[in-house]
Image (cartoon, grey):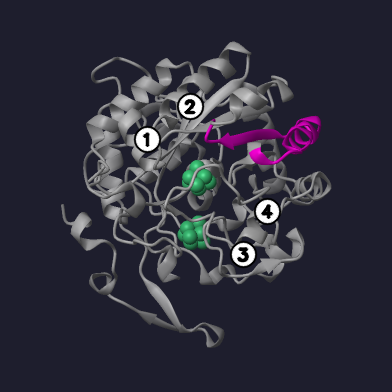
Amino acid sequence: MWLTSSGFRPDQRPRYNAKVAPQIPSRGILRSMAISFLQTVRVASYIAGRKLRGVKRYPLVLMLEPLFQCNLACAGCGKIDYPKEILQKRVSVEDALRAVDECGAPMVSIPGGEPLIHKEMPQIVAGIVARKKFVYLCTNAILLAKHIDEYKPSPYLTFSIHLDGNRERHDESVCQEGVFDKAVEAIRLARSKGFRVTINCTLFNGEDPDDVAEFFDTAMKLGISGITVSPGYSYHHAPKQDVFLGRNASKHLFREIFKRRRRTSGVSWSFNHSGLFLDFLAGNQSYQCTPWSMPTYNIFGWQRPCYLLSDEGYAPSFKSLLEDTDWENYGVGRNPRCDNCMAHCGFEGTAVDDAFARPLKALKAALRGPTVSGPMAPDLPILYRDEARLGKVTEIPVSAIKRNLATEQR
Ligand code: SF4
Ligand code: SF4
C-alpha cells in the first residue's frame, strides 16, 4: 500500500488548499526578500488609511476563485467535489475585475481549482496588475510551461507554486507521480524568465519536522522568494477527518520546525507571513479569527464567512458580505468547524491588526522570530451557542471538544 508520510494512503488524505496564500509583510529574522519593499509599503499605507478612518472591518487579500475545475484530483481536496456543470463554470474577466474593484484589497490571491485552465486567466491577471494590486497566481504548475509566455514579469505578479514537500511527500499528497518534478522545472523556468515565485505548502498530522525543514531548505535553494505554510484545514466535505492537526499539535509541530532553521544547511527561510502570525503558529498568541480580512469571490458570489467554509451561503455583493454576515458565529470557540483552524485566511489579518496596535510587540517578534520554547499562550474559551439567534451561550469544557486529542497529547 502506498502510504503517505502521515501514515495515510494518498486517497485518504484530505487536503486544505494552501493556495489561499495571503501575502503579508514579514520582517522576521526568518525572512529575507519574501515580500517586496514596494508591497510592504503599499500594504502598510493601505492599512494605516483604514485605521485612520476608523474602519472596523477591511479586506487585506481578495481570494478570487475563478473556477473549481482542476487537472489533478487530490482525493481530499475541498474544492473539486462539485458536479460537472459547476466544474465547467468560469468567473468571467468582467466579473473578476468587478470583484477586485468592489473589494478594494491591495492583494489578490487566485487559487482554484487550477487557474491556468481558465482560458481568460492572462486577461484577468493583466487587469489586476494594471490596477497595481499584488496578484498571487496559485498553480500546481503542471500547465505553467505551456502558458508562461502569456504573462509578463511584474513586481505585482507572483507565481505561487503548490508544493507540499520533497518529491515523495508531494507526489503522494497530490496522488500522482511526477508532479513534484514538473513543479520544480516550472519554478526554474519561471525564475529564468524573470518572474517572482513563491511556494505554498500544507502540513498535516504526522509530519516529520526534520523532513519539513529539509524541504524548506530545498525550496529556498530553488531561488523562490518565500514560503506560504499552513496547517491543513479539516474540510467538512473531506472523506476522512482524523488526519488533520489539532491546534496543540499544530503549535508543537511549528515550534519543532522553527527550531530547525539553519540548523543543518544554514539556508535562511523566507515566509510570506507576518512575524506575529508565525509566532501564533508556534503557540505564542491567543488570536481570534478575522475572516473578513481575506474574503472569497467565486462563481457563486461572495462566500460566507471565509475561503474554507462553503456551506454557509453567499452574499450578492461585498458590501452585503461585510454587513449581513453574522461574524460572531465564526471563529475559535464560536463554531465547532472553526475549532481546529489556524489557517492564514483567518488569522493572518488578526496578526497584522495586532502589529498595528502593538508595534513594539510586532518588532520584537520580527527581530527574534517565533518563540520555540516555554509555556504557550492559552487557547480562547470554547463558547458554542445553543440558540444562536437568541444569543444563548453554553460554555463547554475543553476536554469535551474533539480536538484531535490523540495528536494533541503527544
Ligand atoms: S491541486 Fe487541484 S485537486 Fe489538488 S488540492 Fe489543489 S485544487 Fe484540489
Ligand atoms: S476560524 Fe475563521 S478562517 Fe477558520 S474556518 Fe472558521 S471562519 Fe474560516
Q: Label 4 sits on what residue type? A: Gln
Quote the CA–CA distance across marks 2 and 3: 32 Å
| Amino acid type of the residue that numbered disc 3 sits on in the rendered structure | Arg
Please tell me which of labels 1 and 3 falls first in the chain: 1
Q: Earlier in the sequence, mark 2 or mark 3?
A: 2
Select label 3 or label 4 by which is in front: 4
Pointer 1 and pointer 3: residues touching (CB < 8 Å)? no
Marker disc for residue 170 = 1
Q: Does the residue labelled 3 lie within 8 Å of ligand 2?
A: no
257 relative to 43 in the view: left or right: left
Does label 1 or label 2 sit earlier along the sequence? 1
Tell which tag, 4 or 2, sits nearer the viewer.
Answer: 4
Along the viewing direction, whichever of 30 and 309 lies nearer the viewer: 309
Which mark identifies residue 81? none
Q: Identify the residue position indicated by label 4 in the image.
A: 88
Q: What stretch is highlighted in magenta?
A: 117-141
Q: Look at 31% across and 77% down and name the residue there.
A: 396
Q: Is residue 124 magenta?
A: yes
Whether residue 82 is in magenta: the answer is: no
Residue 4: horizontal and vertical position, in percent? 27, 43
Label 1–label 2 contact, CB within 8 A: yes
- Neighbor class of circle 2 (other Cα within 10 Å; few <14, some 14-19, many 20+) is many
Residue designated by label 3: 304
How many residues crowd around disc 3 within 10 Å: few (fewer than 14), some, or many (20 or more)? many
- Which residue type does callout 2 highlight? Ala
Residue 36 coordinates in the image, percent (x, y): 60, 23
Q: How far apart in space, not on screen, are marks 3 and 4 (Cα)?
A: 22 Å
The answer to whether residue 289 shows anywhere in this view is no
For residue 183, the mark is: 2
Q: Which residue is drawn at 35% across and 16% down?
A: 267
